[in-house]
Image (cartoon, rainbow, N blue to C red):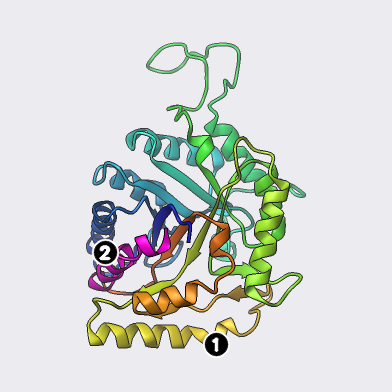
């Protein structure tokens, strides 16, 4: 089918009274993914939930537990962040990983801003929603902030610039685009595009038609160096080696989430694609009807929230067995 890059996206969930065990299990999944031959492993960043709230901190730990696999954030919501400080953290992670970091972000207001008065950055009125992403990219370029050395630090006078400078990291910036406006901005600014099972209804109320429009808009707007790159995410739950209890659990999960796929949801007209579960052959039969898959070479396996570590390990192993079918 033409897929050459296989990735995973892990929620990093944990028990409220024992966060260490869940976070450590997630790091173990990164190690397993590397052993199984996945090309990259990504972690969600979530706030006010029992999941990874600081992708940079978590991925810094992952740099010390892996040696080859690409590492990524999908996505860091910039409404919560100071772009310069975030850039310092991400550059440090990239240096520690020896250039394996992929930075996935999204812009717009923080969803929990109403609960965090006084904690979040204050953006100028009327500023473009994409301005924080533009600031992040500018900071990561580590351009001199003055043409004069500045005193006042222990190392003596230095030209002020973001340190460390992670050369090449600006070529690994990904934008999580759920709308054609975001896709157009990403293409015009030379960012790679992340798209998955959640997008915004616009001209169509049909998910796959809308996603095709989004990708087309991105490619037509492309003004970056080289070729535009699109990474596609799908929730796939293969059951080849699953226990009967796991098969039942996965089927119930897919069935429970199916109603949300029947129409746009909420004030933002959010659309969801149905999840897939079954044997490798059954999942492959469904994927052959996915018109988006032939348009990409980067496929991201998105793992559900609140599954057990043994569920994630079984899914990772079974999906790795599908690589040759998807290539």
The answer to whether 326 appears left or right of 144 in the picture is left
Mark 2 → mark 1, Cα distance in angstroms: 30 Å
Magenta span of residues: 309-327
First reached walking from the N terminus: tag 2 or tag 1: 2
The answer to whether 267 appears left or right of 44 in the picture is right
Say whether marks 2 and 1 touch (CB < 8 Å): no
Residue at 38% of width from left, 68% of height from top? 303
Residue 300 location in percent, x, y?
44, 60
Q: What label does residue 259 carry, if any?
A: 1
Q: Nearer the viewer, residue 57 or 247?
A: 247
Q: What label does residue 40 carry, if any?
A: none
Secondary structure mainly formed by the magenta segment: helix
**Which residue is under mark 2?**
22
Residue 225 location in percent, x, y?
62, 35
Q: Quick one: quadrant of the C terminus?
A: bottom left
Quadrant in the rendering for residue 264: bottom right
């Amino acid at each position: 089918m033409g897929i050459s890059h296989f990735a995973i996206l892990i929620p990093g969930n944990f028990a409220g009274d024992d966060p260490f065990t869940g976070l450590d299990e997630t790091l173990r999944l990164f190690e397993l993914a590397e052993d199984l031959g996945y090309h990259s492993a990504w972690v969600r960043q979530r706030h006010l939930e029992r999941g990874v709230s600081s992708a940079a901190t978590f991925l810094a730990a992952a740099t010390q537990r892996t040696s080859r696999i690409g590492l990524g954030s999908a996505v860091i919501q910039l409404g919560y962040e100071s772009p310069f400080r975030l850039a310092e953290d991400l550059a440090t992670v990239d240096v520690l990983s020896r250039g394996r970091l992929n930075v996935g972000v999204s812009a717009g207001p923080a969803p929990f801003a109403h609960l965090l008065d006084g904690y979040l950055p204050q953006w100028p009125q009327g500023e473009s929603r994409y301005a924080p992403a533009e600031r992040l990219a500018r900071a990561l370029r580590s351009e001199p902030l003055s043409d004069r050395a500045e005193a006042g630090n222990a190392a003596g006078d230095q030209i002020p610039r973001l340190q460390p400078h992670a050369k090449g990291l600006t070529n690994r910036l990904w934008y999580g685009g759920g709308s054609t406006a975001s896709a157009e901005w990403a293409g015009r600014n030379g960012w790679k595009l992340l798209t998955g099972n959640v997008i915004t209804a616009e001209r169509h109320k049909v998910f796959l038609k809308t996603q095709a429009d989004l990708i087309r808009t991105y490619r037509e707007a492309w003004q970056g160096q080289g070729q535009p790159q699109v990474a596609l995410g799908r929730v796939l739950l293969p059951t080849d080696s699953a226990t009967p209890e796991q098969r039942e659990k996965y089927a119930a999960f897919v069935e429970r989430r199916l109603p949300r796929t029947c129409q746009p949801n909420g004030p933002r007209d959010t659309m969801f694609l149905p999840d897939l579960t079954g044997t490798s052959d059954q999942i492959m039969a469904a994927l052959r009807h996915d018109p988006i898959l032939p348009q990409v070479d980067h496929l991201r396996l998105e793992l559900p929230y609140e599954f057990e570590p043994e569920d994630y390990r079984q899914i990772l192993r079974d999906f790795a067995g599908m690589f040759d079918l998807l290539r």
